[in-house]
């Protein structure tokens, strides 16, 4: 089933908005601005401790330390976090659309059998 034009336009507009947000964060990261950095504590508060820890554990999210030593502050890139969050959101949309499409195929197949 092909989505209608209105749905496609809305999806493309959302894609453009997300790309613009990512571009803004990418510029901050490239320029080395502090706005792109978030402490581990702030990352836990903003995005959830379990989410941050799980993505660090699987190697999708990386941190740097400010200062020497194991007890120095861990800092994460907001760009990297936002990119992962948007990718998760997109994956969820694709998965949900696939489920809807599968359900529609089942219904259409059942209607033909009647």
Image (tube, rainbow, N blue to C red):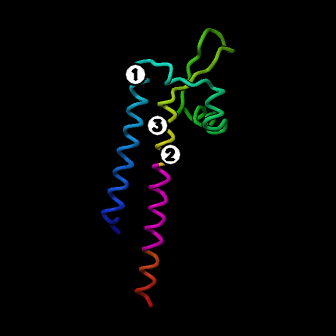
Identify the residue position indicated by label 2 in the image.
88
Judged by depth in the image, the label closer to the viewer, 1 or 2, is 1
Q: What residue is drawn where x is 47% and y is 30%?
A: 79
Q: Nearer the viewer, residue 48 or 104?
A: 48
Q: Earlier in the sequence, mark 3 or mark 1?
A: 1
- Say if the magenta span includes residue 94: yes
State the separation of the CA atoms marked 3 and 2.
9 Å
Q: Nearer the viewer, residue 51 or 11?
A: 11
- Asked if marks 3 and 1 touch (Cβ < 8 Å), the reply is no
Q: Kindly indicate the quadrant of the structure image that contains residue 52.
A: top right
Q: Nearer the viewer, residue 106 or 86?
A: 86
Q: What residue is drawn where x is 45% and y is 49%?
A: 90
Identify the residue position indicated by label 3 in the image.
83
SS assignment for the magenta stretch, majority: helix
Q: Kindly indicate the quadrant of the structure image that contains residue 57.
A: top right
Q: Classify 10 Å Cα crowding around label 2: few (below 14), some (14-19), many (20 and above).
A: few
Lateral position of residue 93 relative to residue 49, left or right: left
Q: Classify 10 Å Cα crowding around label 3: few (below 14), some (14-19), many (20 and above).
A: some
Numbered tag placed on residue 30 in the rendering: 1
State the separation of the CA atoms marked 3 and 1.
14 Å
| 65 relative to 96, above or below | above
Q: Name, please, the residue furthest toward the right.
A: 71
Q: Which residues are magenta?
A: 90-104
Q: Secondary structure at mark 3?
A: helix
Q: Earlier in the sequence, mark 3 or mark 2?
A: 3
- Say if the magenta span includes residue 49: no
Lateral position of residue 16 relative to residue 34, left or right: left
């Amino acid at each position: 089933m092909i989505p209608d034009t209105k749905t496609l336009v809305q999806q493309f507009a959302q894609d453009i908005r997300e790309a613009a947000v990512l571009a803004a964060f990418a510029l901050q990261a490239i320029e080395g601005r502090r706005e792109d950095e978030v402490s581990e504590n702030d990352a836990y508060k903003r995005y959830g401790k379990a989410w941050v820890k799980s993505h660090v554990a699987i190697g999708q999210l990386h941190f740097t330390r400010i200062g020497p030593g194991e007890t120095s502050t861990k800092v994460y890139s907001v760009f990297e976090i936002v990119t992962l969050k948007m990718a998760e959101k997109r994956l969820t949309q694709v998965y949900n659309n696939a489920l809807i499409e599968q359900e529609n195929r089942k219904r259409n197949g059942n209607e033909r059998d009647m």
